[in-house]
Amino acid sequence: MNSAVIHDPLAPSTQPIVDAQTHHEIADFIFQEAELLDDWRFRDWLIVIAQDINYSMRTGANAQTRDRRRKVGPPTTWIFNDNWHQLERRVARLETGMAWAEEPPSRTRHFVSNLRIRPTEDGQGFEVRSNYLLHRSQKEKDNVSYYGMRIDRLRRVDNGFGFEIYYRDIALDQVVITSHNLSVLF
């Protein structure tokens, strides 16, 4: 059996929680970013994405309790692992109106909750651990939800939004994705 060491993004951080004012500023930024995506304001969304972004999403994995305790399990299934240029190309394709998977365009709602915010260990900014739900509705009857946990790393910048995202790791709870395509942005 081909096994791999399980990376545990849920491991507790040693960094302290940020103060209430910083928490409020970052939470407002996270909610504003979700609004940009739901409103199809993708060019504005790219402004909050750092040029050195590491933007990835993976599915959950089924592993027996005894294997999880030993930190051994099936290999991670990566859905995407994008950089800024790949994200910009995805946005450009959506803007053409020729992306068949988004004709007619999906209606999305991004829900982000349970924000836990700490300074990053690398000293660049802040790490935001959150629960995540993206509901997508398309055509008359196509509805799908993606849910899981997300870790974002942000740093303060002067871009009109106050922060930029330089790292995003989305870990879906689903083991199998039943959607007929993944053309929306997370």
Image (spheres, rainbow, N blue to C red):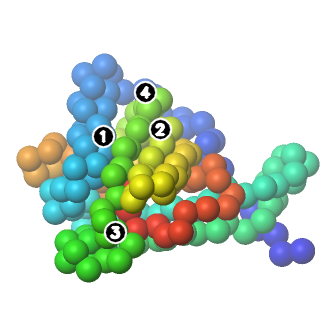
Foreground mark, 3 or 2, reads 3
Are the residues at dot 4 and dot 2 in contact (C-beta closer than 8 Å)? no
- In the image, taking residue 164 as reference, residue 169 lies left or right, namely right
Q: Is residue 11 visible?
A: yes
3 or 1: tag closer to the N-terminus: 1
3 or 2: tag closer to the N-terminus: 3
Query: Mark 1 and mark 2: span between their CA atoms?
Result: 10 Å
Query: Which residue position is annotated with label 1?
Result: 30
Foreground mark, 4 or 2, reads 2
The type of residue carrying mark 4 is Ile
Point out which mark residue 130 bears: 2
4 or 2: tag closer to the N-terminus: 4
Point out which mark residue 102 bears: 3
| 137 w.r.t. 99: above or below | above
Q: Residue at x 52, y 49 (%)?
A: 145
Nearer-the-camera pick, 5 or 102: 102
Please tell me how many numbered marks the rendered image carries: 4
